[in-house]
């Protein structure tokens, strides 16, 4: 056999290497490797700051919801961008702007404080990011939307309706207690209190109006900064007003605990409405015995599915979730998953434009709703209510509860009633 030269051998090796590379290129051209698709989802919450407990519940609820679908929607992998509001409107708006421009989120979900929602609405609209199911309920959001519906339509449906749609049940409960002689107030004077935020003032003004319509005299309105815990001056004003009823809402656990403790220590002879006391899972650790006989509106764990979620959450994260910042965040995350699936089926891709269009066409029109949640029977919107959800016993409704020794007792509506209104012991003397 004729030997080949070293030069010829080396040339053959080069030709084989080149041919192998060509074949590999052909294979890649015939069977291209697809880049994985990613849906970047911004989750807005108070992950640090005065309401960090809420942020912890948000994270846990979101993760549990998306674990149900293995973090995948169709052929898209979900990547979470955690946007820390720090319970501060200005910082929240800056963080959201960064998430929209630098992280290039495709959509956003959730938020806690109303004042944060009011600020972030502009960032979402400016960057055309559809943001679904923010919890902020203040009517200021509705006013901004109504001022420019097209621009602010990127705030894609509030989880919480305006307080005007919810406060009337408190008055109904109190008037029934008076009528049935479960409570004989020393006067019909009421004082309104709360944080100096969009939600705090919206709730305070709404319930003040309801009280006045029912024949009460609102003798005082006091609002204080978020996170304030030194409230002696506020309590002194309320003590001088001598109200039979104190009504308000505080969304920050430390402030609410301080308010209730100071009111008890001052010996105020008032029935107390503290709307939102039960929004945080460990509310009794915060308020202790000062929560006894306080009235609140809160969702309840009423189904096996809800109790399963509650128990699983506690097992994973080591603390119990609330029905609001845990249970409803879970529901709204599941609702978003359904919206994303519908968007993908209709438009073939998930991005800001397709999610916005689907939200407008299907969610806001009332064509789709969500009935597989664990808290409310049905989450639904329509052109007459947007950006609010429908409110009613079959839709968004809060039972009125009264607390005693760390337990809640439903006193309204009749179908869920567990006990009658209980008169505080300090009013029986």
Image (cartoon, rainbow, N blue to C red):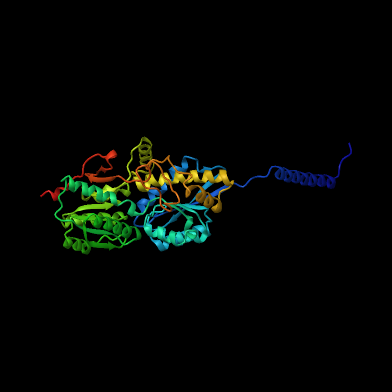
Is 93 in front, or is 219?
219
Which residue is situated farthest in the top direction here? 304
Is 186 on the left-hand or right-hand side of 164? left
- Which quadrant of the figure has residue 221? bottom left
The image quadrant where one finds the N terminus is top right
**At which x and y percent is residue 137?**
37, 54
Is 428 in front, or is 144?
144
Is 131 in front, or is 388?
388
- Which quadrant of the figure has residue 64? top left
Is 44 on the left-hand or right-hand side of 18? left
**At which x and y percent is residue 63?**
44, 45
Identify the residue at horizontal 33%, vertical 58% (top origin): 202
**At which x and y percent is residue 290?**
21, 51
**At which x and y percent is residue 217?**
21, 59
Is 107 in front, or is 295?
295
Which residue is situated farthest in the left direction here? 429
Which residue is situated farthest in the right direction here? 2
How many marks do you count on the picture? Answer: 0
Tell me, yes or no, if residue 292 can be seen here.
no
Tell me, yes or no, if residue 314 can be seen here.
yes
Q: Is residue 110 above or below residue 223?
A: above
Q: Is residue 425 above or below residue 114?
A: above
Is 253 on the left-hand or right-hand side of 244? right
């Amino acid at each position: 056999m004729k030997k080949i030269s070293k030069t010829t051998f080396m040339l053959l090796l080069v030709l084989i290497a080149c041919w192998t590379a060509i074949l590999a290129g052909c294979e890649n051209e015939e069977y291209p490797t697809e880049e994985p698709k990613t849906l970047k989802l911004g989750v807005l919450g108070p992950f640090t700051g005065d309401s960090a407990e809420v942020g912890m519940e948000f994270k846990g609820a979101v993760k549990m919801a998306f674990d149900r679908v293995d973090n995948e929607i169709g052929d898209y992998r979900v990547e979470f961008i955690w946007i820390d509001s720090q319970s501060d409107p200005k910082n929240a708006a800056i963080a959201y702007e960064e998430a929209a421009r630098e992280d290039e989120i495709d959509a956003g979900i959730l938020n806690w404080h109303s004042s944060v929602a009011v600020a972030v609405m502009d960032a979402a609209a400016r960057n055309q990011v559809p943001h679904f199911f923010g919890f902020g309920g203040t009517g200021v959001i509705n006013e901004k939307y109504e001022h420019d519906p097209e621009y602010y339509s990127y705030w894609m449906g509030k989880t919480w309706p305006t307080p005007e749609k919810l406060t009337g049940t408190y008055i109904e409960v109190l008037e029934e207690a008076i009528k049935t002689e479960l409570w004989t107030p020393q006067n019909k004077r009421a004082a309104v209190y709360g944080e100096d935020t969009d939600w705090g003032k919206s709730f305070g003004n709404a319930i003040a109006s309801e009280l006045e319509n029912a024949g009460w005299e609102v003798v005082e309105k006091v609002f204080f900064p978020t996170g304030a815990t030194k409230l002696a001056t506020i309590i002194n004003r309320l003590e001088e007003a001598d109200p039979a009823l104190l009504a308000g809402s505080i969304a920050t656990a430390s402030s609410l605990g301080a308010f209730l403790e100071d009111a008890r220590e001052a010996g105020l002879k008032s029935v107390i409405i503290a709307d939102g006391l039960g929004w945080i899972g460990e509310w009794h650790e915060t308020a202790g015995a000062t929560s006894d006989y306080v009235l609140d509106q809160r969702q309840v764990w009423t189904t096996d599915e809800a109790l399963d979620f509650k128990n699983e959450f506690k097992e994973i994260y080591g603390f119990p979730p609330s029905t609001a910042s845990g249970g409803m965040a879970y529901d709204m995350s599941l609702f978003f998953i359904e919206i994303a699936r519908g968007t993908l089926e209709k438009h073939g891709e998930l991005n800001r434009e397709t999610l916005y269009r689907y939200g407008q066409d299907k969610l806001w029109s009332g064509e789709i709703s969500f009935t597989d949640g664990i808290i409310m029977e049905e989450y639904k919107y329509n052109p007459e209510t947007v950006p609010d959800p429908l409110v009613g016993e079959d839709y968004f409704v809060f039972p009125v509860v009264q607390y005693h020794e760390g337990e809640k007792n439903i006193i309204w509506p009749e179908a869920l009633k567990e006990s009658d209104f209980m008169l505080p012991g300090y009013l029986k003397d």
